[in-house]
Image: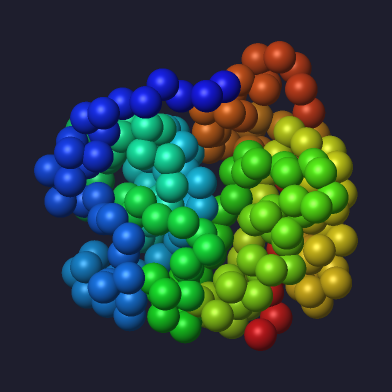
Amino acid sequence: MRLRFKENAIPEMKENPLIYFDGKENKGKWKEIFGNNNEIYLEIGSGRGDFLIEIAKDNPAINFIGLEVNTNAFVVASRKIKENELTNVRGLIADAENLEEIFENEEISRIYLNFSTPWPKRRHHKRRLSHERFLNRYKNIIKDKAILELKTDNKELYEASCKYFEEFSMDIIEKDENISEEKSKYLSEYERKFRNKNMPIYYIKARFNK
């Protein structure tokens, strides 16, 4: 569903010191921004921030960055970050195409892809965030043996992603064609919606080998 344009979204987020735009000037400085040496986990496509907020609450010793290109959605997440006073979370308005300009090599320890656009048409497959084109980008910003976790409601994307990861010489640690809510634990707004419709949630946990 298309979000209605919110003309105040950008000005509002620019007033929030925990939200960054573009982020290129912070390359190599993210630990300095957080003020500690904790591991940094990156969620690409954070939407309204439900997953990001809940996982950050339970893991105060890990730093989380939520990246989102859609300002209409992320303005909601920015409010939640501020309201919950989460010092271990930063929001980043940016395009995943620019990851290597935003993060230095080995800055990121884990990547989450939650209900990314499946891009079903063959000519659009390279836009998938699990495609080899993006895996190469991730490889240039992650630590060795970093973990990538993917959840989707789209079976074809799930099956294709398993293939992408294997062809990229990643180790698939775990995969599930209908992960339970208890095991899934942290739910995005999309996952909650799909579970309410009794739709299966596909899950992959894979490890990079640099």
**Residue name at image x 47 percent, y 83 percent:** 105
* x, y percent for residue 199: 76, 22
8 or 80: which is nearer to us?
8
Quick one: which residue is furthest to the front in this view? 123
User: In the picture, which quadrant includes the C terminus?
Assistant: bottom right
Query: On the picture, is 113 further left or further right than 133?
Result: left
User: In the picture, which quadrant includes the N terminus?
Assistant: top right
* x, y percent for residue 94: 40, 55
Judge whether residue 164 can be spotted in this image. Answer: yes
**Residue name at image x 27 percent, y 72 percent:** 26
176 or 123: which is nearer to us?
123
> How is this picture coloured?
rainbow
* x, y percent for residue 37: 30, 75
* x, y percent for residue 157: 79, 45
**Residue name at image x 43 percent, y 47 percent:** 68
Residue 73 sits in quarter: top left
Residue 131 sits in quarter: bottom right
Query: On the picture, is 170 further left or further right than 116?
Result: right
Tag count: 0
**Residue name at image x 85 percent, y 72 percent:** 167
Residue 192 sits in quarter: top right
Judge whether residue 179 can be spotted in this image. Answer: no
